[in-house]
């Protein structure tokens, strides 16, 4: 597995280690629970896999040329590691009520599937090719997709850690 995605998998495992289904489901009013955060991440991985598969089926990258604003956003997130707080998740990535037990099992599988799909696109189109548009950031290379998921996941790991510490 890619280094960024392995770090992400390890961070998620560490953040949720020892949490019961009740712990994962608990949340402050108006905020997501740890299980909902995990489902959100699962949905982002699923979306990335689908996008990478579309690229492979099309036989070409599906990325558009980046705008100046997108270049700056991509640099901020995948270059500097900055992830803005308070942005609402795109609707396809919002939790839908996946059972806690299912999301904890499926998350790791989907992360591995995403790593494999990104790797296949990178092998086919090259390391420097922007393969697919991110819905907010714009066109990313395979490496930038991996780094995005690490930075995004790290942001949510911190949320899970705060939820975890609030239970004690």
Image (cartoon, helix red, strand yellow):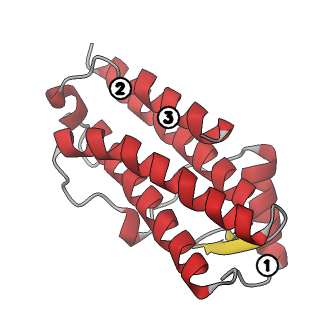
Q: Would residue 31 be seen by someone viewing this image from the given angle? A: no
Mark 2 crowdedness (10 Å alpha carbons): few <14, some 14-19, many ≥20:
some
- Cβ–Cβ under 8 Å for marks 1 and 3: no
Tell me if 10 is positioned left or right of 63 in this view.
Answer: left
- Viewer can see residue 63: yes
Identify residue for label 3: 9
Q: Nearer the viewer, residue 49 or 161?
A: 49
Residue 86 lies left or right of residue 102; in this view the side is right
Residue 93 rendering spot, x and y as whole percentages: 39, 63
Where residue 51 sits in the image (x, y, percent)? 53, 73
Marker disc for residue 16:
2
In this rendering, the answer to whether 55 lies above or below 153 is below
Q: Residue at x 46, y 57 (%)?
A: 45
Q: Nearer the viewer, residue 141 or 115?
A: 115
Rendered location of residue 11, percent (x, y): 51, 28
Residue farthest along the top direction in this orientation: 168
SS for callout 3: helix
> Marks 3/2: CA distance?
11 Å
How much space separates mark 2 and mark 1, taking CA atoms? Answer: 36 Å
Q: Report, in whole angstroms, how far the alpha carbon at label 1 lies from the one at label 3.
A: 29 Å
């Amino acid at each position: 597995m890619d280094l960024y995605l392995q770090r992400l998998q390890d961070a998620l495992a560490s953040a949720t280690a020892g949490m019961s289904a009740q712990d994962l489901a608990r949340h402050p009013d108006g905020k997501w629970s740890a299980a909902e955060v995990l489902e959100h991440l699962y949905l982002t991985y699923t979306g990335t896999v689908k996008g990478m598969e579309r690229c492979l089926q099309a036989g070409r990258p599906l990325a558009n040329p980046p705008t100046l604003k997108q270049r700056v956003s991509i640099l901020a997130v995948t270059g500097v590691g900055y992830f803005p707080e308070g942005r609402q998740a795109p609707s396809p990535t919002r939790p839908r009520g996946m059972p806690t037990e299912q999301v904890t099992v499926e998350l790791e599988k989907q992360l591995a599937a995403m790593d494999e799909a990104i790797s296949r696109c990178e092998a086919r189109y090259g390391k420097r090719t922007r393969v697919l548009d991110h819905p907010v950031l714009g066109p990313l290379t395979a490496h930038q997709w991996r780094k995005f998921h690490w930075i995004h996941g790290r942001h949510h790991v911190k949320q899970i850690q705060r939820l975890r510490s609030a239970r004690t």
